[in-house]
Every structure is written in structure tokens, then in C-alpha cells.
Amino acid sequence: MKAAAYIRVSTEEQSSTGYSLAMQRERTAAQIAAKGWTPAGVYEDAGYSGGTLQRPALARLLNDIAAGGIGAVVVYKLDRLSRRQRDTMHLIEDVFQQQSIELLSICESLDTSSPAGRAMIGMLSVFAQLERDTITERLSGGRRQKAGTGGYAGGGAALGYTAARGTKILLPDPEGAATVRRVFLLHEEGLRLQAIADRLNAEGRTTKRGARFTPTQVMRILRRRKLYMGGYSYGGVSAPGQHGAII
């Protein structure tokens, strides 16, 4: 039987836990060999959270399973697949079991080929969900506290700003700031969202990702008036921002 190894680390885990990709690759390969299975490749997601199934290597694995030829999936730990109970059970019940794929998790010594293994995986996925919720709550609390001082709480910086690496401080971006000011000027002139987007595109201006503007993107800028005026809010907490106003 052909067995695929799936390995994953998030950015935080690479530096704070022992779940390195090299270690997972070694342990899964040894387990496949011990079972007498034929290796069907290693599917590696580096720097991807277990809180979502939107991961490139996982997507390739699921596509290859659907195409046939893979009979088992080996992971170092169940939460390498997902930290969400709903997603874990979706993979097990709606994907692996439907395709007659055996799932083997090394740390938990579990194998879905047995009823006891399937029951235990269901319980373990509950604890994986609890762990993720605890981490999210802790991070959100820290971000809210930072927002209370007007500090940048993280996430993608809005158009008109850049985030200083390591310090999480918003700094004005001259080109982006000019585009933001242009949006508000055109809006004050009474132009509708589509007209503003068309004008920006005609002027050669682009979004944060270098794409053309759409009415939705224009609306997002307009809704961030408070941020662009120097204020900051996160999770219901508002305060004067540490960043400079650009309008």
C-alpha cells in the first residue's frame, strides 16, 4: 500500500516547539517503513496555521487522494492536520473514510483502521480545538491591550502604511498615502465608488498588492477614515494611534 506523509509547522512552532519539518519528515518516513508501506511522497506545509484547511500541500494531498493511488496518510501528530475539531473530523469522515484511506498519527499511536482509533481521534480533536481557542484568546487579549495604547495590533497594514518588521509600528508609505488622499478627495467631490475606482485605475494607481481598484476596495479605504486621521481601534478598543495621520 502506498502511504503519503503530511507534515506542517506554523511560524511560531518552528521556533518554539520540537515539531520541526526535518523531525516530522524523519519520523513519518520511519513509520511508513515499519509498516511495510511504499512511500508516496511527503506533503509539506511550512509556515501555515492549523486553523485553516487552505494550505497548498494539503490541497495537493487531497487532490492526489481523489485521483487514487494513495492508501494511507501518516502524520507525526493529529494537530498537524488541523487544530479545529470540525476540520479534523471533516478530513477523517468525509475524505479519508470515503476514499478508504487509513490515517496513522504517530504521537497518539492511533490508526483509523480500528474503531477504537477512530473514537480516540474524535476525542483528541476536541482537545486540539480547545488548545487553539486558548491561544487565540491569549493573543487577542494582548492585541486589545496594545490597541488601548494606540499601538498596531498586527495584521496586514492598510494602504498608505507599512508595518516595521519586528516592532509592529505603522509607518506612512508616501505613494500609498497619496492614493488614500486621492480617494477621499474624489469622494468629497461626490463621485460614486465605481467612478472613484475608474479614476484611480486611469491614473495608474494600484492597491496594496499592485492590483486594479474595485468599488469594494474603495469602500474599504473610506471606512478606515478614523485610522487615516490618526486613530486606532481593535476588538472594540479605540485610542489615539501611535502612527501619523495621512488625511
Image (tube, helix red, strand yellow):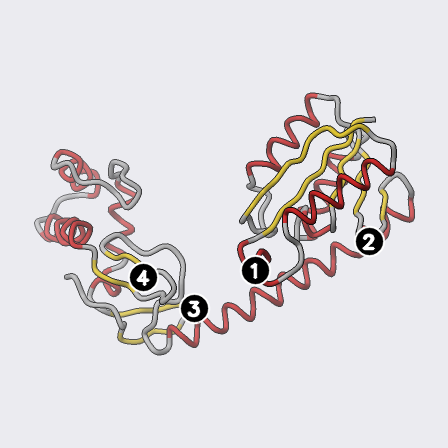
Q: How far apart, in angstroms, are the residues tagged by discs 1 and 4?
A: 21 Å
Q: How far apart, in angstroms, are the residues tagged by discs 3 and 2?
A: 37 Å
- How far from the left and from the top, in percent, is residue 207? 26, 43
Q: Look at label 2 and name its amino acid.
A: Glu
Q: Look at label 1 and name its amino acid.
A: Ser
Q: How far apart, in angstroms, are the residues tagged by discs 1 and 3?
A: 28 Å
- Res. 108 mark: 2
Question: Upstream in the sequence, badge 1 or badge 2?
Answer: 1
Give the camera-side residue of 218 and 244. 244
Question: Upstream in the sequence, badge 3 or badge 4?
Answer: 4
Secondary structure state at the residue bearing disc 1: helix
State the residue position of label 4.
Answer: 164
Give the camera-side residue of 186 and 37. 37
Q: Quadrant of the C terminus?
A: bottom left
State the residue position of label 1.
Answer: 15
Q: How far apart, in angstroms, are the residues tagged by discs 2 and 4?
A: 41 Å
Q: Are marks 3 and 4 in contact (CB under 8 Å)?
A: no
Q: Look at label 3 and name its amino acid.
A: Gly
Residue at position x 13%, y 33% from top? Answer: 202
Residue at position x 25%, y 57% from top? Answer: 161
Observer-side mark, 3 or 4, equals 4
